[in-house]
Amino acid sequence: MVKETVGHTVKRKLIISISAGFLLFGIVLGIFGFTGSLFALPLGGMGDFYVSFDRLEGKGFTLNPQIGETGIEDEAPLVRNRIDSATIENLKIYKDLKLPTGSWIRINITASEPTEIQGLIQDARFIDANLTFDEMIIEQADTSEMSAEEMFTNNWKHQASTVTITDALIVTDYLFQNLVSLNGAQISLERISDPDTVENVSDSKGGNSSGTETASHIDNSRNGGELPSTTSSLFLPIFIGTVCLMIGVIFLLIRHWRLKKSGR
């Protein structure tokens, strides 16, 4: 029986290809780890996200009604905010998730330095904040020949050249950013007894006119408490591990080349 060789693997080319893949992967992680920049970041379809910040300076603001998906509804009335560019101070985002065991955890994302965002789209169903607009325009549209959903989303539009939002707490079900730079970002997990809801957030804010309590709600929520002191950057250790792996692959290539050259 004659065996035919269909093909063979060139080990050197295979190892070089794998090394190049790890190199590109390490570069991507390194860029995000050291600059905190990420492109086209959408979050939605998993329930409420809770966002708080001390101050937002934005350009190109638009607000209009929206029908969108939430964690418990396929179609719910929301408010869509669009901002061309924004700078946010002391940004904090958290999301409560239920584990298969039935217990709850909270994912916290904080930025100790100003956050830069380009192309922000946000669908919110609760907003507690102080707002200031420049060149504000409110437009009414003719919706007589539109469908019911189109009438709802296109009936009116609120625009402004700039917007300043302070002491904000926002409950949102969809976030999208063309580009976001989370400077000084930290990601942490913590166990909680029960998730936050729009109802208990709005109840806790009832009668509060100063906005100070609103801005500090995420720091001292009744369920989550303060962020754990073990909070650390997630991306830096991943990048370091990738670099170590790449160094190991390079040493293997050098060793293989030396053995081949010596004829062993």
Image (cartoon, rainbow, N blue to C red):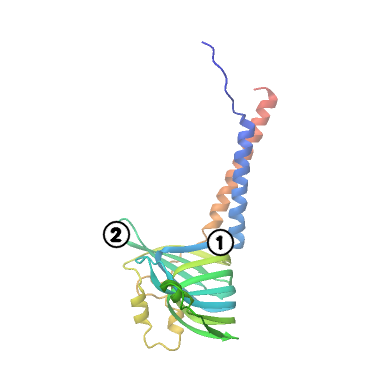
> Which residue was labeled with disc 2?
102
Taking the spot 51% from the left edge, 78% from the top edge, the residue there is: 63
Q: In which quarter of the image is residue 19?
A: top right
Residue at x 35%, y 75% (from the top left corner) = 222
Q: Residue furthest front?
A: 145
Residue 175, given in percent of the width and then of the height, sits at: 49, 67
Looking at this view, is 187 or 79 the one in front? 79
Q: Residues within 10 Å of mark 2 (few under 14, many from 20)?
A: few
Q: In this view, does 52 lie above or below 96?
A: below
| Quadrant in which the C terminus appears | top right
Q: Residue at x 61, y 34 (%)?
A: 14
- Compare residues 126 and 253 and report the one nearer the observer: 126
Q: Can you see residue 4?
A: yes
- Asked if residue 79 can be seen in this view, the reply is no
Q: In which quarter of the image is residue 68?
A: bottom left
On residue 40, which mark appears? 1
Amino acid type at mark 1: Ala
Between label 2 and label 1, give the one nearer the viewer: 1
Q: Residue at x 56, y 17 (%)?
A: 4
Q: Nearer the viewer, residue 180 or 176?
A: 176
Q: Specify whether 251 is left or right of 104.
A: right
Of labels 2 and 1, earlier in sequence is 1
In this rendered view, identify the residue nearer to me: 226 or 206. 206
Which residue is the extreme one toward the top? 1
- Where is residue 28 shown, x and y percent of the image? 60, 53
Q: Is mark 1 on a helix, strand or loop?
A: strand
Q: Quadrant of residue 229?
A: bottom left
How crowded pointer 1 is (Cα within 10 Å; few <14, some 14-19, many 20+) is rated as few
Q: Residue furthest left?
A: 102
The x and y percentages for residue 90 are 53, 74
Question: Percent position (x, y) of residue 259?
Answer: 65, 27
